[in-house]
Amino acid sequence: MSGAIVIGAGPGIGTSVAQRFAREGLAIAILARSRLTVDTALGALEETRAETLGLTVDVTDEARLLSALDEAVDRFGVPEVLVYNAALIQSDVLGELTARQHLDAWAVNVVGAITGIAHLGPAMTEAGEGTILITGGMPEAIPEVTSLSLGKAGVRALTELLARAYEPAGVHVATVTVAGTVAPGTTFDPDEIAEEYWRLHAQPAGSWEREVLYSGRPEAAAAHRPE
């Protein structure tokens, strides 16, 4: 295995993570909802000289997501790293959204991760190695972003479930919980956050962490294993 698949490669964490892994020599497959986002991410990867593939996909479209993942595997093989970074970030308070809107948010924030990881996880476990990383957030629920708070709580639970399923077969599963608004040049700079993704991937078996809480300063990024 020699490649990484990044699902949700926007101009923040997704692109920075793709660049970080590309600098280590991995081929990179970028999946994003719009062609503009895909092309922007591919442009940012040009200086790394990595092999790249860019695919447009809405993570709520199960058939298209599975097809795109298969295309990435056909190109680069079973991934060494699978990153799920897609999220529906919106402001909403309790009672503001309809049931349909909540389901739409959950489909992006959690179900897309389930779909993608369940599709590739068995092949990664069969290979006996690899890393699955999910972008988390909202270590504490915030009433002004109810649907995202619920989604990130779901991500934390999903990470635990996946770890129990896949870690015995040699696949590291973890989440990077980002406790702030991501923006270049701030204490939540995406390039600094991307270092945590690489650090998790580089950890040897036996010392794997399941969650890193990134609280805004590189030296303050604290890690803990959920009980």
Image (cartoon, rainbow, N blue to C red):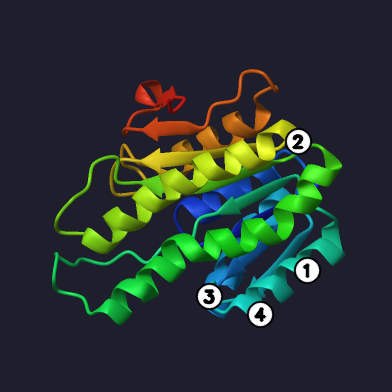
CA separation in Å, label 4 and label 3: 14 Å
Neighbour tally class for label 1: few under 14, some 14-19, many 20 plus, Cα within 10 Å? some
Q: Which of marks 1 and 2 is nearer the N terminus?
A: 1
Residue farthest toward the top in the current orientation of the protein: 206
Residue at image location 40% in from the left, 52% down from the top:
154
CA separation in Å, label 3 and label 1: 17 Å
Quadrant of residue 7 within the rendered picture:
bottom right
Q: In the drawing, what numbered circle is on residue 169? A: 2
Residue at image location 85% in from the left, 64% down from the top:
75
Neighbour tally class for label 4: few under 14, some 14-19, many 20 plus, Cα within 10 Å? few
**Callout 1: SS:** helix
Residue at image location 86% in from the left, 66% down from the top:
74
Q: In this view, does 143 lie above or below 100?
A: above
Which dot, 3 or 1, sits closer to the camera?
1
Tell me the amino acid under the disc marked 2: Ala
Q: Name the residue under label 4.
A: 63
